[in-house]
Amino acid sequence: MYDINSMKAEEFIDHDEIIETLDFADKNKNNRELIEQILDKAAPKKTGRGVECAGLSHREASVLLACDDPEIVDRIYALAKEIKEAFYGNRIVMFAPLYLSNYCVNQCVYCPYHLKNKEIPRKKLTQDEIRDEVIALQDMGHKRLAIECGEDPVNNPIEYVLDSIRTIYSVKHKNGAIRRVNVNIAATSVENFRKLKEAEIGTYILFQETYHKESYEKLHPAGPKHDYAYHTEAMDRAMEGGIDDVGLGVLFGLEMYRYEFAGILMHAEHLEAVHGVGPHTISVPRVKHASDIDPGVFDNGIDDDTFAKIIACIRIAVPYTGMIISTRESESCREKVLGLGISQISGGSRTSVGGYAGYSPTERPHDTEQFDVSDQRTLDEVVCWLMKTGYIPSFCTACYRAGRTGDRFMSLCKIGQILNCCHPNALMTLQEYLCDYAQPETKKLGEALIAKEINNVPNEKTRKIAMDYLKQIREGGKRDFRF
């Protein structure tokens, strides 16, 4: 039985509720009166505190996703864009993945790290190798990483992860520093989540892969990840362990996309209801080719138009949640969805263990890749592209370091006040990038963009302080200012 407040996975992600939701959506996808009510409910409203959005339930959002009326779809896209701009503006946060180890005891059928794959060489970075990787990432200009590793209690115990986090934070090379380490590792215990919190991680990220329990168990035939409930309840344990920034995600293409869409929104609703704060981010990866993995064997793939509509509907349903798209997707696909809700993207990414150190910006090893990278541009090329398309590449990590996490971040975001922090912080971190790493064309574009965008900081006092900070970065060699 569906219970949003239950701590049992099969009750807050209730199969019957999802089936009923999909049936309701099918029956009402042409119900113009209901759809108008849903769109009106979701639209940003001006209040005495700023701009606010009501969001949508999983059932309401599923109606929008099911609707195929071209006029309504255009309105969905327009509303998603309006909401995205209201709370995230034209800022796009940059990050890179860092793969520590591909040893894994699971047998996930969609992942090349699965235990039975004999084609892929197994590799685990030493702490010295991690330092080399971090220096290479810093020399690209990155300030925010997401660390990844397979699940293996012998090769990748929590102690190894904690040591790696300490190593990453300790590396200071030239003007470089990693200021936020997000962690994407297997579901673990409350005790281990407390250890990750003490290690000062940013967001704990865990992809559900699929919310369909029967499919989940078939896709994970053996290994610790086979336990659907333990995996699905991980975010509750993370919250109990003190981590209030968590990131959800499903791997689109494994199961029916509308089922996954309803499931991830139900998970977000559960976190909000039980813990008072929903997910900090939602990721939307799609199944891609990799060693020993053919995405064609999964018959639930989605085309780019459907993918864009999913992103727009998620943005409308959870207006304050960050949305992430990786280099799994092509340049054209990423450009299409940036305005529909995406607020974070990776750039210059390697999905290999040890994929950065010793390679030029245009080189990449393929032997230990977790998946094929579609967007293979360098970080500087991505930064330049973003500015040409009207976005501000941001390397900001200020909210996390200032303690604006969990409900504290959401309370500011929900009334639009985060703009007075995020906009100048984005410009200052972009200025750092321009001074330390940018190619000439990127630097020229960036300087013009900063000169224009600094005038959009709403608070006059904040704007004047930010302008002084920008001057100190450019002329005085100072770094790491933040609001």
Image: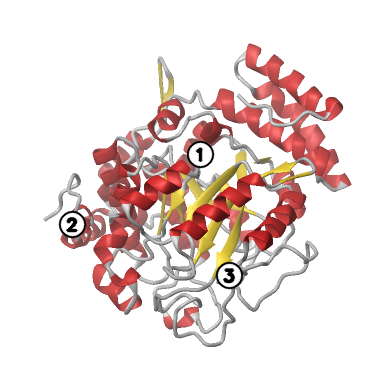
Q: Which residue: 42% across, 39% down?
A: 319
Visible in this render: residue 129?
yes
- How far, Cα to Cα, is label 1 from label 3? 39 Å
Identify the mark nearer the N-term, 1 or 3: 1
- Please name the amino acid that badge 1 sits on: Lys
Specify the quadrant of the image occupied by residue 261: bottom left
Circle number at residue 110? none
Q: Residue at x 68, y 56 (%)?
A: 131
* Earlier residue among tags 2 and 1: 2
> Pointer 2 and pointer 1: residues touching (CB < 8 Å)?
no
In the figure, is residue 249 to the left or right of 442?
A: left
The picture quadrant where one finds residue 98 is: bottom right
* Cα distance in 3D space between marks 3 and 2: 42 Å
Residue 133, x across and y down, in percent = 69, 59
The extreme left residue here reads 1
Q: Specify whether 466 is left or right of 436.
A: left
In the rendered image, which residue does mark 3 sit on? 124
Establish if 23 lies above or below 479. below
Residue at horizontal 40 percent and vertical 14 percent from the top: 48
**Quarter that holds the N terminus:** bottom left
For the view shown, which residue lies furthest in the top direction? 461
Residue 233 percent location from the top left of the image: 28, 55
Residue 265 visible: no
Instruction: Using the image, determine if residue 382 lies above or below residue 453.
Output: below
- Where's residue 352, x and y in %? 62, 69
Marks 1, 3: nearer the viewer: 3
Tell me the SS state at disc 1: helix
User: Tag 1: Cα neighbours inside 10 Å, few (<14), some, or many (≥20)?
Assistant: many
Local packing at callout 3 (Cα closer than 10 Å; few below 14, some 14-19, many 20+) is some
Q: Which residue is mark 1?
A: 84
The disc labelled 2 sits on which kind of residue?
Answer: Glu
| Residue named by callout 2 | 17
